[in-house]
Amino acid sequence: MNDDFGAEMKAGRVKWVPLNIDEQPNRHYVDDYKLYAKSVVVSVAQDGKETGWENLERVWTLVRNEAAFKDYVRGAIKAQLERA
């Protein structure tokens, strides 16, 4: 994340927020994002309110191919930044 989005992270435009959905305060994300397994979700917020999100379902098919995995996640983040 820092390599690709360091400036955006410093500016507060991109955040990495790992969550454990097994913890009670985070259980709602299972329903919110239609999760059925651990995943990566790209969430877009403006003025503190979520305006869109994408569950990156292909992460598990790409997990053993680091370059493809990173390209997939990077592309999803870039697409959301362009929409914002």
Image (spheres, rainbow, N blue to C red):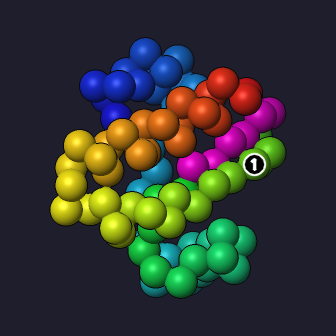
Task: State the residue at coordinates (48%, 37%).
Answer: 75
Can you give x and y, in whole percent of width and height, for residue 50 in the image? 76, 48
Question: In front here: 3 or 62?
Answer: 62
Q: Which residue is labeled 1 in the image?
A: 52
- Relative to 44, 1 lies left or right: left
Instruction: Give the image quarter of residue 16.
Output: top left
Horizontal and vertical percent position of residue 17: 46, 51
Asked if residue 22 shows in the view, the reply is yes
Tell me residue 20's x, y (percent): 43, 72
Left or right position of 80 against 1: right
Q: Check the image and report above or below for 47 versus 37.
A: above
Amino acid residing under circle 1: Gly
User: Quarter of the image holding residue 31?
Assistant: bottom right
Q: Main secondary structure of the magenta part?
A: strand
Q: Is residue 36 above or below residue 33?
A: below
Q: Secondary structure at mark 1?
A: strand
At x 60% / y 33%, what residue is drawn?
79
Q: Which residues are magenta?
A: 42-47
| Circle 1 residues within 10 Å: few <14, some 14–19, many ≥20 | few
The answer to whether 43 appears left or right of 83 in the picture is: left
- Can residue 28 be seen at all in this image of the molecule? no
Screen quadrant of the C terminus: top right
Q: Is residue 43 magenta?
A: yes
Answer with left or right where residue 16 lies relative to residue 77. Answer: left
Q: Number of callouts in the render?
A: 1
Residue sitting at x 80%, y 45%: 51
Asked whether residue 1 is drawn in magenta, I would say no
Q: Position of residue 66 (x, y in %)?
A: 21, 49
